[in-house]
Image (cartoon, grey):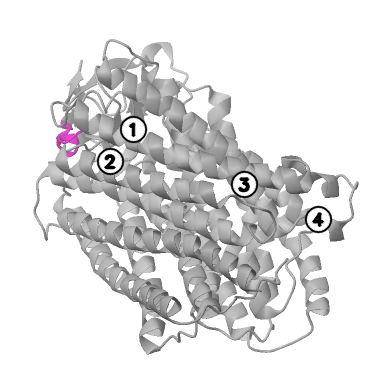
Amino acid sequence: MSSVVSEEKSRNNLVVSYLTIGGIVILAMMVFGVLMLLAQGGVLEFTPAAFYQFLTIHGTGMVGAAAFAAAGVMWYFLSKYVELSKKIMKINLVLFLVALVMVIIGVFSFEYASAWTFLYPLPAISANAWGVTGALLYLFGMLILGVGFLLLHLDMGRAIIKKYGSLAKGLGWDVISGKKAEKDAPSSTVVASTMVTIVNVTAITAGAIVLIMNIINVINPSFTFDPLLAKNLTFAFGHIFANSIIYMAVIAVYEILSKYTNRPWKANKPFLIAWTMSTAFTLVIYTHHMLMDPVMPKWMLIMGQILSYANGLPVLVITAYGALMIVYKSGIKWDMGSGLIYLSMFGWVVGVVPAIVDATIVVNHVMHNTKWVPGHFHMYMALGACAMIFGFMYYLAKQDSSIKTNKIDKLAFIGYTIGILGISGSFLVSGALSTPRRWATHFPEWMAPANVGAVAGVLAVLSLLVFVIHFVRYLNKRNKVDYKQDDKKLA
Amino acid sequence: MVQIVASITSLFFMLVVTAVFAFVAMKSREKRDYEPIKKKWYKARTFYGTTLVILFLVVTIYTLRELPYDQPVYGEENLPIIVDVEAIQFGWNMSETEFSVGEPIEFHVTSSDVTHGFGIYDEDKNLIAQTQAMPEYTNEVYITFEEPGTYEILCLEYCGLAHHLMIQKIEVK
C-alpha cells in the first residue's frame, strides 16, 4: 500500500509542478497583456520596441504555458489508463524551463520581437531592431520546447498503442466499425489523448521544419525559402498546437463532471465519430488563417471556411451538449472545481461563435487581423482552456488535501468570469470598429475599448492570483501532512 | 456593413449560448434519474444537430456566392486601373494614389522584404478590403470606391517595430 501511495505522490508531484509553473507563467503573461492594452489606450507610454517585446512574450508564453499545464492535466488522467514514462515527463519539464529561459533572454536581453508568429523572413529582416543572437535564442528556444512536447506525445502514443493495439483503436475506430461493442470502447480520456497525440506530433513536425528554415536563414540570409510554404507551416504548427490545448484540458471536463454528477460520460459511437472528425479537421483547417492570401489555391481557402464550420459541430453537438446533459437535473454540488469546469464549457462554446463568423471569407475580408481575432480566441482560450486548467487545479487540491476554499475564491470566480468576458468583449468591439491587432498605439477613436479591456484585465489578473495562491497553499499543505491518496477508481 | 452583420449575428448566438448554459446551471440542483434525461436529450440532439448542419450549409452556400478573390467582369468602356503596390519596412510604394469614384481598381500587392498586410480604410476608419503583402508573391484586391474622400492604407500584418506607422493616404475624387 505504501509503495502505491508513494508512486501516486511522485506522479502527482510532477503534475503539480506542471500546473504551478503553468499557472504562474499565465499570470505573468496576463500582466503583459494588461500593459499592452494600457499602452494602446493611451494610459501608459512605452517604446514600440518594448510593446512588441511584450507582444512576443505574451503570445509565446501564454500558448506555451497553457499547453504545458494542459499536458499536466492530460498526463494526470491518462496515466490512470496507460503506463506513461515519468522520465519523459521530467525531461519535458526541464526542456520547457530551458526554452522559457532562452525565449525570455532572447526577447528582453536581445530585444527580439517577431511576435509568436515569427513569419519568415521577419526573424532575419528586422530593420536592425534585433540581431542574430536574439533571433537564434528565440528560435532555438521554440525548437527545444517543441522537442520536449514531441517526446511527451510520442510516449503517450507509445503507451496507447501498447495498451490498445494502435492509435486507430485509441480513437475507437474498431467500435465505430462495429468490430467491438460500445461498452468496450476506450475511455473519453484515451480517445482525447490519442487525438492530441496525432495532431500535435504533426504540428510540432511542421513547426520544427519552419523553425529550422528560419534558423538557417538567420545564420546565412543567402539561403532563402518560399515565404508561402513557410507561412503554411507556421500556421499549421501554431493553429494545431494552440488548438490542442483545449483538447488536452477537456479531459478534465469529462472526468470531473462525471464524477461530480455521478453520471457516466461514456464514449459511444457519436462521441467517437466526433473525435475522429475533430482529429481530421484540426489538422487541415489552419488555412482559415490564410484566407487573405489569394495566391493560395482557391479550393484550399474555400475548404478553410467549410471545414472551420464543420469543426464547430463536434464541440457544439457532442462535447458541450454532453456537458449540459450530464449537469442538467443532476443534483451536482457546485464548488470551485466543478464551477470552473462548467464555466470552461461555456467559454469554449461562446468563443466558437465569433470564431466561426470570422472563418467566413467575406467577413474575414474586413475582420482578419483586427482585434476581432483576439476577441474570440481569448474567450475559448482564457474562459475555455484556462478555466479547465484552473478548475482541475481546484479539483486536485480538494482531492489531494484537506484545504478549503473561502469567499475570496468565490469572488475570484466571479471576477475571472467578468474579467475575461470584459477583455474578450472589448476586443470584439474593437474588431467591429476595424481596430488592427498588434499595433503599439491606437488612434484616439480606438482607445476606449482598449482601456475597458485593461480594467477587465486587472480584474482577471487579481482573480487568477487568488487561484494561484490557493494552489500554492495546497502545495504547502500537502508537503506538511501525510499524503491522502486521491480517488483513483476512475478506470 | 459586414462588420455590423457579423457583430449582431455573433451577439445573438452568444446570448443564446449564455441563456442555455444559465438555464442548465439553474436546473442543476434538482435531482432526477439520468436514463430518462438521456433518452429525451438524445432525441433532441438529433434535431439540434440536423438543424445546425442545415444552418451551416445554408450560410456556406450564401456566403460563398461572391468571393473577394474573384476578378470582376469589366466592360470594354470600363477597364480597371492597375495599381502596383510594394510594401517595404515601413512604408508603401504605390504607382498611383489618386482615384475617381466609380472607376474599377486592381491593387497588385507585393512586398520587397517581409510579410505585411494591405488594409484599405475609409474616412470613418472602417476596414473595407485587405490582402496580404508577401515577398515573392502578388495578391490582388479588386475595389471600386463609391464615396469620395481620403482613404488610408494601414499595415495589418506585424512586420517590425514601426508596423503601426505604415500608413499611406490615398485620395478619391
Question: Marks 2 and 3, Cα distance to the nearest angstrom?
Answer: 27 Å
Q: Label 3's element?
A: helix
- Relative placement, left or right, of A450 versus A244 is left
Question: Marks 3 and 1, Cα distance to the nearest angstrom?
Answer: 24 Å
Q: Could you say which is closer to the camera, residue A52 or residue A166?
A: A166
Q: Is residue A436 visible to us here?
A: no
Q: Give how far across and how far down residue A179 sits, in percent.
A: 91, 46
| Same chain? Circles 2 and 3 | yes
Q: Is residue A206 visible to us here?
A: yes
Q: Label 2's element?
A: helix
Instruction: Return the chain for callout 1.
Output: A
Q: Label 1's element?
A: helix
Magenta highlight range: B157-168
Q: Quadrant of residue A218 in the image?
A: top left
Q: Does the magenta stretch include residue A131?
A: no
Q: Give how far across and how far down residue A143 sits, in percent.
A: 39, 34
Q: Nearer the viewer, mark 4 or mark 2?
A: 2
The vertical placement of B11 against B76, above or below, is: below
Amino acid type shown at disc 4: Ala
Instruction: Return the chain for callout 2.
Output: A
Question: Marks 4 and 1, Cα distance to the nearest angstrom?
Answer: 41 Å
Question: Marks 4 and 2, Cα distance to the nearest angstrom?
Answer: 43 Å
Residue picked out by circle 1:
A140
Mark found first going from the N terminus, 4 or 2: 2
Mark found first going from the N terminus, 1 or 2: 2
Cβ atoms under marks 4 and 2 closer than 8 Å:
no
Amino acid type shown at disc 3: Met
Amino acid type shown at disc 2: Met
